[in-house]
Amino acid sequence: MSTIMPHDELFRKAVAWICAAKEESEDSIPVLVEKAAVRFNLGPKDSEFLIKFLSEHPDGDVAFGA
């Protein structure tokens, strides 16, 4: 049986997954975001935001607030 997770938790997990995958993969940001979208059930607006955000902050130098 699956556990229902809040959308913001899935989004955080997707960002963490993308950051980890960037270290191990030579895939581009859009490709990684697409893979994360499928894995974490993100919508098109979430994907667009992530592509833009991660392109502007390639080093992941932004802390996500508590």
Image (cartoon, grey):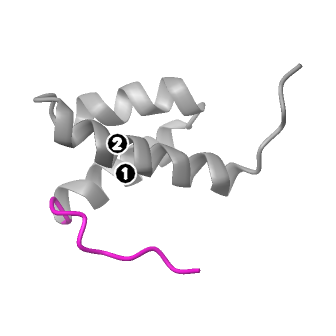
Question: Is residue 47 positioned above or below 12 on the image?
Answer: above
Residue 10 vs residue 21, the one in the foreground: 21
- In this rendering, the answer to whether 38 lies above or below 15 is above
Nearer the observer: mark 1 or 2; the answer is 2
Q: Residue 37 versus residue 60: which sits nearer the camera? A: 60
Q: Which of the two labelled residues, at mark 1 and mark 2, occupies the earlier sequence position?
A: 2
What secondary structure is the stretch in magenta mostly built from? loop
Residue 54 in the image: x percent, y percent?
A: 26, 56
Tell me which amino acid carries mark 2.
Ile
Report which residue position mark 2 lands on.
Answer: 18
What is the x, y in percent for residue 51?
A: 29, 48
Residue 65 position, x and y percent, is 52, 80
Q: CA distance from mark 1 to mark 2?
A: 10 Å
37, 24: nearer the viewer: 24
Q: Residue at x 16, y 28 (%)?
A: 27
Please check the rendered image and state whether residue 59 is part of the magenta-colored stretch, yes or no: yes
Report the amino acid beneath label 1.
Answer: Leu
Label 1 environment density (alpha carbons within 10 Å; few <14, some 14–19, many ≥20): many
Horizontal side of residue 53 vs 1, given as left or right: left
The quarter of the picture where residue 47 lies is: top left
Q: Are marks 1 and 2 in contact (CB under 8 Å)?
A: yes
Q: Residue at x 48, y 43 (%)?
A: 14
Residue bearing the label numbered 1: 50
